[in-house]
Amino acid sequence: MSRPVARRAKQIPLRTHWIVLTMLLVCLSTMLLLNGYTHHMFSAFGEGGPVPAGPADKVPPQVVKGGPVIEAGSGQPRTASPKARTIALTFDDGPDPIWTPKVLDLLAAQHIKATFFVVGTEVAAHPELARRIVAEGHEIALHTFTHANLSTAPGWRGAFELRQSQLILAGAAGVSTSLLRPPYSSTPAALSNADWAAIQRTHDAGYLTVLSTQDSEDWRRPGTDHVIANSMPRSTAGQVLLMHDAGGDRSETVEALSKLLPRLKARGFRFATVSEAVGLPDPTHKAGLLDRGRGLAVIWVMRISDWVLSIIGWLLYAAGALSVLRAITTVIAARRHARMRGWIYGPPVTEPVSVIVPAYNESAGIEAAVRSLVASDHPLEVIVVDDGSTDGTADIVEALRIPGVRVIRQANAGKPVALNTGLKAARCELIVMVDGDTVFEPDAIRKLIQPFGHPAVGAVSGNAKVGNRGGLIGRWQHIEYVIGFNLDRRLFDLAECMPTVPGAVGAFRRTALERIGGLSDVTLAEDTDLTMALCRDGWRVVYEESAVAWTEAPASMGALWRQRYRWCYGTLQAMWKHRGAMVQRGRAGKFGRRGLTYLMLFQVLLPLLAPVVDVFAIYGLVFLNPVRVLSVWAGFVLLQLLMGFYAFRLDGERPGPLWTLPLQQFVYRQLMYLVVIQSVFTALAGTRLRWQRMERYGSLQAPVVR
């Protein structure tokens, strides 16, 4: 390998975008937490629902036998009941965009005022209805933020429920209230110790508790006649009647009201709000400017969280569709490509080959690389271009004194320049370019050049395999090479849109290289840039799977990050440089519309969507059905495993390393998509990176026998 000399480049602190991304992630997580909380997904065990009545020995007798409006003071609790022949109509769980307007219309037609105990999340979703309730003279009161059971909820949640409800009411309608009806409550006689403790806590927060004396039981949907029967007073005593304007189909409630209200009026009953019915001062007050502002902020955050979740949902569908599409496409293409094994491009190619090895500080592996080349069963010359190494790389090669191996020394100028230097010195028409850490099978070069029997073939990609696959990181890269890179190359070969001939093992026609002006140094992925240039020049680029070479992969996460960052950023540079292929005709257009589109969808867009998948997976485990979420995840892992077994079978590899594939989803996968994010931000910022030298370990000492 070689490195370029340092160039002046626009330097932008790359840490800035990680700060921005972290802030976005925190905001996204906060919105998802809020969305999960507000959509009744706080617990997978249905926390907040009604519970069986418990002991009631701590509930004061005067409360049990008292009225439905309760002030649970620290001293003697007080209760109040509606006046005789007075009915306080109360509606819970709203506002609802369908049923609340119909209830309001009925009340307006009968000139009746009622009390609406509203749920904060519903007010946030329909603030205009809360404003209408207040504007038409009805009384508005709280029914918590998410319809939580205050008797079972921990203290912090109860306080949160009340505070958020009050803020949202202030933001939506500009008012505050001191009336509260706890969800799942009933009559005073039905209070338990837990209910009483919750009522005391809400009193300490400044609220009067409003229970009911008569339940229409419309929530059961028993039929209109039963709702009317349940709502009729049994005496002339005043009543607090419980009904619902939300929580499902309330057509029975609306129909019952239309008949019930005239009937009660005819019997001499009057209607009033809760405060009027028991003689309380008006509990509704104008909210302060600060609370109104905070309430509006909460409402907008909730709306945005809903929008974000909807967008994430669509992105998840897109990511899933892309993943499945890629799996199906690559497997079908690989199957068709496998049937082409033994394809004869033309007469056997027997002419000698020039092998160019650009090297910068490759002392760890250069001897093994050179010895594997000269052990080839095909005639060749080896040209090692030492690009200003400081570790004695050139001296090691010269000391071997192997016939047919030449060493060219040059000042450090970069890998593309080193390759161009080797190209000028080469004596043969067929050129093989390899990295200084690559070890070839004895028959690799002979097999690699056979496609040149067809005059349209300008370059051939060999089958690069990971040699140092002993550790977990090595196994993961081995899996990626077999499943990702090699399956993709089969597809690209079939579709005639090969974007990259890897630097580790690739062959070229000298004529083709000279026609495009040799290698360019304007990108960090000189192999991708070169391949795309050949495709645009009309040359066919193919994949020869039987030409096997072994490369040394990074052995640490840091080295892997640097390598993939350079690869990804260089690929983005090359894609941008050759974007004109999208509108060209012939082979160039075929490469552009097929190859560049594939790269954009599956190597840029899909990795950018991956963090969304991970964030939503955590959201699903916390707030949704974790079994379902894990099942979906297991389904995708199974899909990858099936692809892996097939790919390993095609490549003649043992499937043993695939046991690490599920683990790959938790570290390696995140590293890969963070590399793409980093590369995209770097490209958008206009920053130019320097070529970074990879760490070499000298782990490939001789050709590996499978």
Image (spheres, rainbow, N blue to C red):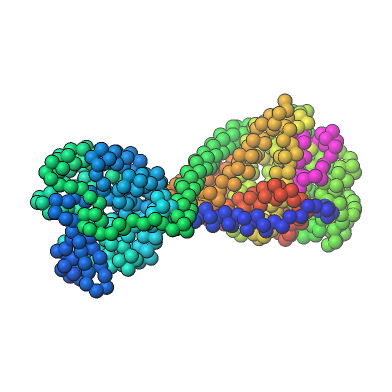
Please state the extent of the stretch shown in magenta in the rendering. 509-535
- Let me know if residue 520 is in the magenta part: yes
The x, y position of residue 31, in whole percent, is: 48, 53
Image height of 341 relative to 136, above or below: above
Describe residue 246's horizontal placement relative to residue 358 as left or right. Answer: left
The x, y position of residue 237, in whole percent, is: 12, 54
- Let me know if residue 365 is in the magenta part: no
Residue plotted at (59% across, 32% down) = 336
The x, y position of residue 59, in whole percent, is: 20, 68
Residue plotted at (62% across, 55% down) = 20
Q: Quadrant of residue 55?
A: bottom left
Residue plotted at (74% across, 48% down) = 686
Image height of 221 relative to 120, above or below: above
The x, y position of residue 279, in whole percent, is: 22, 58
* 175 or 223: nearer the viewer: 175
Q: Is residue 665 visible?
A: yes
Q: Is residue 313 visible?
A: no
Residue plotted at (60% across, 42% down) = 605
* 59 or 152: nearer the viewer: 59
Describe residue 314's horizontal placement relative to residue 168 as left or right. Answer: right
Q: Which residue is most to the top?
A: 586
* 467 or 414: nearer the viewer: 414
Describe residue 279's horizontal placement relative to residue 642 as left or right. Answer: left
* 461 or 444: nearer the viewer: 461
Describe residue 468's horizontal placement relative to residue 64 as left or right. Answer: right
